[in-house]
Amino acid sequence: MGLADFWKGRRVFVTGQSGFKGAWLCLWLERLGAQVTAVALPPPSEPSLYALAGPWPDSYHFTDIRDRHALADHLRKSEAEIVIHMAAQALVRPSYADPDETFSTNVMGTVSVLDAVRDAPTVKTVLVVTSDKVYANDGAGRAFVESDPLGGKDPYSASKACTELVCASYAHSFMDERGVTLATARAGNVIGGGDWAQDRLVPDFIRALEQGAPLKLRYPDAVRPWQHVLEPLGGYLTYAQALTEGDGAAALPAALNFGPQAQDFATVAELADALGKGFALERAWEQAPGQWASEAPFLTLDSTLAAEALGWRPHLDRQQTVDWTVAWYRAHRDGADMRAFTERQIADYEEMMA
């Protein structure tokens, strides 16, 4: 069954719809005909894709996922069959500044969501989105697979590794006996139009471009699994569908990586140079002065298991990923209808998936 056939009319509960990935996901679900209820804090930036892509249905609420009574009430009323949990404090550097908020949101927020699921009789499938940073990074420079040890030296990474443990515990202790399938999806370093978060490469580049100054890079030689936002979202939708259909969940892994092909891994500097070329800049970046909080020099994912289990694969190479991202921000600069533009990119991506 294709995505459109499966998701049409499907009741879905999403957390984090006001964020970069969440807004893209909800636009895609609405395009597929799903009945979406969503909860999140207000948009974390100004501007934001969420604001640009409105108006949104009345079933979208600004609710902190740690407000257990409100969250559980929204979930019960939604009568959702599938929960996709994406709400999070999603940035490494802010996690150093406020580790309490990071652990509270990412770990106890997930506990709140899963407890709400326990009281929601309609839910059959829960997909929790964590991060590529859940792995204990030993600096060896190899791509991580799902069986690698979990860990995290910075508060953000550690909070996401803890989230994985919470999910495994709830699956064993509560969900399995209720017939609810609980799985986690690991992806990170997504780029695409509509991201204005602090301390992420593309938004920082766009702000520097608007100021007429080169981007300041902290770690230009760091390697990351850059991918367009639609790549992991397509994986999430495919994974959630497979977990829900028939008896397929029993044969599926409880966690999957979604990342680019190995040839599309790139350094921070290489991606910044590609963005600069897209905007016809002679000099896209320069080294940021000073000392910075530690970040892993090499982080990549092996997505072989997702290919084997789901038939999932990336469809955009590195240059296409940059081209689609540049096109989005150019359209925004030129005053285009960004909801329509974003939906058009989703439609183009769906054709690639077909």
Image (tube, helix red, strand yellow):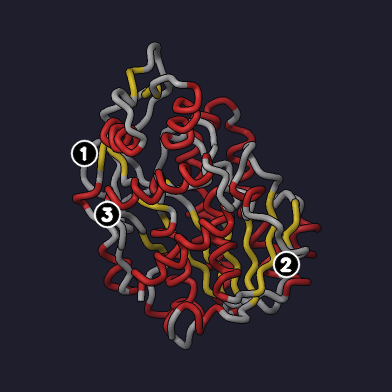
Horizontal side, residue 56 vs residue 260: left or right: right
- Specify few, some or many for label 2: CA neighbours under 10 Å numbering under 14, 14-19, or 20 or more: many
Return the disc, 1 or 2, that comes first in the chain's sequence: 2
- Specify few, some or many for label 3: CA neighbours under 10 Å numbering under 14, 14-19, or 20 or more: some
Gap between marks 3 and 2 measured at Cα: 37 Å
The C terminus lies in quadrant: bottom left
Q: State the SS at label 2.
A: helix
Gap between marks 1 and 2 measured at Cα: 42 Å
Circle 3 residue: 317
Residue 351: percent from the left, percent from the top? 38, 72
Of 81 and 139, the residue lying toward us:
81
Give me the residue at 80% from left, 57% from top: 70
Residue 14, above or below 181: above
Circle 1 residue: 140
Q: Amino acid at mark 3?
A: Asp
Return the disc, 1 or 3, that comes first in the chain's sequence: 1
